[in-house]
Amino acid sequence: MKDFPLDEQIAICEQSIQAIDPDENKWYEWIQKAADYGNAFLKSTRSDNAWQPYDINATHPPFSLQNHPENMDAILGECAQWIDHTGLNPASGGHLGYIPGGGLPAAAVGDLLAALTNRYAGVSFANPGAVALEHFLIDWMRREFQLPESAGGTLTSGGSIANLIAVVTARDAAGVHPEEWSKVVIYGSEHMHHCIHKALRIAGLGHSIWRMVPLDDEYRIRPQALQDMIRDDHASGLKPIMIIASAGTTDTGAIDPLNEIASIARHYQLWFHIDAAYGGFFYLLPDSRKKMAGLELADSLVVDPHKGLFLPYGTGAVLVRDVRHLHESHYYIANYMQDAHNAGLGLSPADLSPELTRHFRGLRMYFALRLAGLDHIKSLLRHKLLLTAYFYNALDDLGMEKGPVPDLSVCIYRIPGPPIDANDKNEKLLQSLHADGRVFVSSTTIQDTVWLRLAVLSFRTEKKHIDTLLDMLRTYIPLITAEASDS
Ligand SMILES: *Cc1c(COP(=O)(O)O)cnc(C)c1O
């Protein structure tokens, strides 16, 4: 090449632009193929199992990269064979484990267009419209969660990063002198999500004092115990900074007594963080809102639209009561960003999050909510509560031990008996359910006791999926209890 004149070298390289930038026909062909694939997938979510067992030793996907452009068929074929029919299908209505959501197809259209147009939603200067859309969505949540106008936030990749942002903000707002870090105390429950422990560690609070507040019989923080701990810690010269509560724990869906915890936080001037990644959007329903009273008192609040708004993975959110604290922890100044800083357009997502360039997440959320309408979203959230109550009632006929009456749409249950022999039976039951795979449930261990867990939050989950689970339980429980008494 180096013997060619510069112009010719440039022209040769430029042929590559045309080669990878599709013309109208190519674009339609790609979209058509992807749409056909999507149609087949959507159809399969109505009939396929929620869990497809695989042999981990036989899983060697032949992924490859070639030097030449390839046809889409080969890639779609690999997706079908190695990705979309293996293990857990989170898009299935039969996904009743962990915390489902489903993934509204309308959001995929928003994602497609966000990727195609590649609009910059990090700073207002680059695209005031894209940033305004993200602000609008944050503000919609702020109003729904009844936070004051001083509140602001940002869309994140999920609940873990949202919790990390909140923890960092709380840490900075506490204004702890570096020498005092070992005296810092943080309070939360044993049932707090593990991502917050991760966040505390990442935020440099791993060596601070972590107080696990005792829980009541329904796995909620006991306010009196919390208050006693804080009082004692103050008396012994420690530096309490933050209380972390959950509005819907992952284990049991329990809602901590938020109002009472908020009063304690106020009284001792502690930051009040609420992790509502799972339960948050039930607040849109008046009945659940009563159970979550106090959510609106959070200094920082995490919700996960990819759970409670049924969006695809990759959408979380954090809201901070006084957005200035969020800004204080996440602003930046860089000379190469001076055009953006000087535009005077107010706060941008990049001022409120560790991210600069990021996926334009707002578009998927906007497409999904507009194309669905809020009434259907709320009706389906209610539907999940009803299905959970239906399942909880049906457990009586199965001779299962039931956990607390569900606050939301998670419930725990087990083959009864002392953990020493019942744990094994419950684990076997879970294995049988997985091997069957029609619907998928998960398990948890609470104080050395194994429980099976139902979590209903996929928008596609119908009563028939719960009936299938009940059917499966009716089949496998007698087999397992008989097997145990034989041996
Ligand atoms: C799911 C969940 C998280 C973590 O959120 P990701 O979106 O998975 O990162 C945190 N807290 C609770 C209560 C959750 O349910």
Image: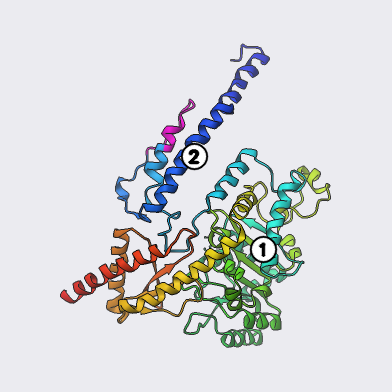
Which corner quadrant holds the N terminus? top right
Which corner quadrant holds the C terminus? bottom left
Magenta-tinted stretch: 62-76
Q: Residue 173, how many percent across, how many down? A: 72, 69
The residue under label 1 is 141
| Up-down relation of residue 212 to residue 284 (above or below) | below
Q: Secondary structure at mark 1?
A: helix
Asked if the stretch drawn in magenta spans residue 425, the answer is: no
Q: Is residue 441 visible?
A: no
Of callouts 1 and 2, the N-terminal one: 2
Q: Is residue 285 left or right of residue 474?
A: right
Identify the image quadrant of residue 418: bottom left
Q: Main secondary structure of the magenta part?
A: loop
| Up-down relation of residue 32 to residue 45 (above or below) | above
Q: CA distance from mark 1 to mark 2?
A: 32 Å
Given the image, on which type of amino acid does mark 1 rest?
Answer: Met
Asked if the stretch drawn in magenta spans residue 69, the answer is: yes
The residue under label 2 is 35
Q: Residue at x 41, y 53 (%)?
A: 89
